[in-house]
Image (cartoon, rainbow, N blue to C red):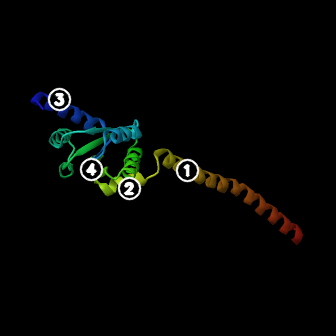
Amino acid sequence: MARADKATAVAELKSEFEGSSAAVLTEYRGLTVAQLKELRKSLGGNAKFAVAKNTLTKIAANEAGVTGLDSLLVGPTAVAFVTGDVVEAAKGLRDFAKANPLLVIKGGFMEGKALDAAEITKLADLESREVLLAKLAGAMKAKQSAAAAVFAALPTNMAQLADALRAKRAEAGE
């Protein structure tokens, strides 16, 4: 690879690191081109899966301010640059790795922090963003419904108390 080609590749990788919300490093040794194509398709719009040389990836990551990946850049490495939902991309990679054991998740980077493979798996185990937002909305609605019930009960209880007091006075002959 000529020096100009390397500089171009580093610039492209740097822009990918800067433009993505997360990056997941994988080892793809033994996967066929068809399997890699299937993986790219399964990631859809959430991530871009790219194979790059480790030294160029290290340089690009350092230039983009991404640290902590140097120890992961050993052996054949491919990077999934996540631009969409990080959880969905992690699920896609995890599911593909279960079906194709030759894909090994090494670790990654998200929000300024290096992640190991176990943390990527924990991300994949999270529910989707839509489900979490729906649960939050449901919890907020439940709290509002409970508050509304308390506020509605106050006048009712006051009316019942006044009626009981009136009935007691009527019994006493007042």
Identify which amino acid the numbered label 3 is placed on: Thr
* Residue 119 falls in image quadrant: bottom left
Say what amino acid the circle numbered 2 marks.
Lys
The mark found on residue 122 in the picture is 2
Q: Position of residue 29 (x, y in %)?
A: 26, 48
Residue drawn at x 64%, y 52% as measured from the top left: 148
Q: CA distance from mark 3 to mark 4?
A: 26 Å
Judged by depth in the image, the label closer to the viewer, 2 or 1, is 2
* In this view, the mark in front (4 or 2): 2
Regarding mark 4 in the picture, which secondary structure is present there?
Answer: strand
Position of the C terminus by quadrant: bottom right
Q: Nearer the viewer, residue 17 or 73?
A: 73
Report crowding for label 4: few under 14, some 14 to 19, many 20 or more residues within 10 A (C-alpha): few
**165 or 66: nearer the eye?**
66
- Up/down of 155 relative to 53, above or below: below
Among the two numbered marks 2 and 3 on one chain, the one whose residue lies closer to the N terminus:
3
Residue type for callout 1: Met
Left/right placement of residue 33 relative to residue 9 reads: right
Report which residue position mark 4 lands on. 113
Q: What residue sits right under mark 3 in the picture?
A: 8
